[in-house]
Amino acid sequence: MSVTIYHNPSCGTSRNTLAMIRQSGEEPEVIEYLKTPPSRARLVELIAALGISARELLREKGTPYAELGLADPKWSDDELIDFMLAHPILINRPIVVTPKGVRLCRPSEMVLDLLDRPVASFVKEDGEVVVSRKT
């Protein structure tokens, strides 16, 4: 199975998601999107595959969201994508791509349905135990 994760190693949710993927037996392509942002075309593809608007992919916490005035509804999806390309930290994460679909994995256990062999249980960094519904 081909698995790609758009990952931020500073994000606990992203780290937990990556660990669940690896524990399922998959070694994903890890794209640290802050170092290697997606192209405009790829970001548009991801948003379409997620079935959400560009606004729904925006991250507010720990980003220049407020300073840039992005809460204002005047911004079009194209303009919001421009902001995400200029400031990749605005892209919410982690985004996981597999043959089963594309998903923003918040919370991290959202990744389980995308994997062929999801872990039966997983302990997140904060101690929360996740049990797969497939067991």
Image: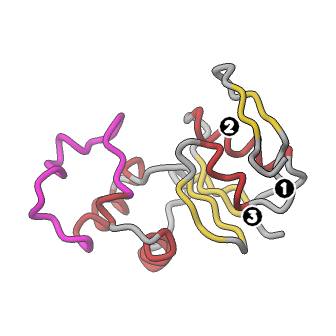
- Numbered circle sitting on residue 3: 3
Report which residue position mark 2 lands on: 16
Q: Quadrant of the N terminus?
A: bottom right
Q: Distance between the residues labelled 3 and 2?
A: 15 Å
Task: Please state which of residues 58 and 121 is positioned toward the viewer in this rendering.
Answer: 121
Displayed quadrant of residue 61: top left
Query: Residue 77 at what x, y percent from top left?
Result: 26, 71
Crowding at mark 1 (Cα within 10 Å: few <14, some 14-19, many 20+): some
Q: Are marks 3 and 1 in contact (CB under 8 Å)?
A: no
Q: Which of 22 and 30 is in front in this view?
A: 22
Residue 27, disc = 1
State which tag comes first along the sequence, 1 or 2: 2
Q: How far apart are marks 1 and 2 (CA)?
A: 14 Å
Residue shown at 66% from the left, 24% from the top: 128
Q: In this view, does 30 lie above or below 76?
A: above
Residue sitting at 42 percent across and 76 percent down? 44
Q: Which amino acid does label 3 sit on?
A: Val
The amino acid type found where label 2 is placed reads: Asn
Q: Is residue 92 left or right of residue 119?
A: left
Q: In the depicted view, which residue is nearer to us: 135 or 109? A: 135
| In this picture, residue 91 sits left or right of residue 16 | left
Crowdedness of circle 2 by 10 Å Cα count: few (<14), some, many (20+)? many
Decide whether the magenta segment is chiefly helix, strand or loop: loop
State whether residue 70 is above or below residue 51.
above
Range shown magenta = 57-78
Where residue 18 sits, quadrant-wise, is top right
Q: Is mark 2 on a helix, strand or loop?
A: helix
Q: Is mark 3 on a helix, strand or loop?
A: loop
Specify which label sits upstream in the sequence, 3 or 2. Answer: 3
Per the image, is 18 magenta? no
